[in-house]
Amino acid sequence: MSLFSRLFGKQAAVAYKTWHTGSGAATCQACKDLDGTCWLPGNSFKGPPLREGCSCPGGCTCRVLVVRQDEAWGPGNAEWIEKRGGLVSGEQMDKFLSS
Ligand SMILES: [Zn+2]
Ligand SMILES: [Zn+2]
């Protein structure tokens, strides 16, 4: 985000969101499995923190990364996610991005 948009609150719409797990060996498998999951803002998928099934010591530290429409690959990726029902796994996304 540029300083300009931060100051004036002019932000492009959210294209999609990505699950980003906390780093380190303490991250539990349930959280790791969700790393890279991408979903559209309108999807009913609930982002982090993971409450059910998380066994990270101290609780889930996963975060949401937001990709906006004005980011070069935002709109195209969002379109691809939408075609797959608005929610894709990190594995699917990795394949897409490397294809
Ligand atoms: Zn966890
Ligand atoms: Zn987590």
Image (cartoon, rainbow, N blue to C red):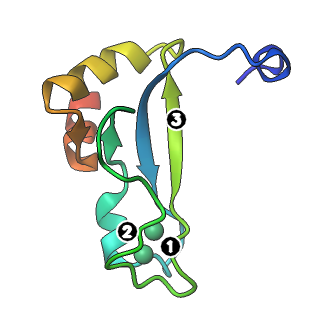
Q: In the rendered structure, which amino acid carries the disc numbered 1?
A: Cys
CA–CA distance between discs 3 and 2?
18 Å
Task: Report x, y in % for residue 61.
Answer: 55, 68
On residue 79, the disc is none
On residue 31, the disc is 2
Task: Report x, y in % for residue 83.
Answer: 14, 23
Q: Decide which of tag 3 and tag 2 comes sooner along the chain.
A: 2
How would you rate the neighbour count of disc 3 (Cα within 10 Å): few for under 14, some for 14-19, many for 20 or more? Answer: some
**Under 8 Å from ligand 2: the CB of mark 1?**
yes
Task: Report x, y in % for residue 93.
Answer: 26, 38
Q: How many marks?
A: 3
Q: Residue at x 34, y 32 (%)?
A: 42
Q: Which type of secondary structure does the marked residue at label 3 adopt?
A: strand
Q: Residue at x 36, y 48 (%)?
A: 36
Q: Which type of secondary structure does the marked residue at label 2 adopt?
A: helix
Give the residue at mark 1. Answer: 60
CA–CA distance between discs 3 and 1?
18 Å
Q: In the rendered structure, which amino acid carries the disc numbered 2?
A: Cys
Task: Report x, y in % for residue 32.
Answer: 36, 66
Q: Pointers 2 and 1 in contact (CB under 8 A)?
A: yes
* Ligand 1 shown in quarter: bottom left
**In this picture, is 71 found above or below 51?**
above
Q: Is 77 or 53 nearer to us in this picture?
A: 53
Image quadrant in which you'd find residue 86: top left
Q: In the rendered structure, which amino acid carries the disc numbered 3?
A: Val
Give the residue at mark 3. Answer: 66
Q: Residue at x 29, y 64 (%)?
A: 33
Q: Decide which of tag 2 and tag 1 comes sooner along the chain.
A: 2
Q: Residue at x 53, y 80 (%)?
A: 59
Q: Decide which of tag 3 and tag 1 comes sooner along the chain.
A: 1
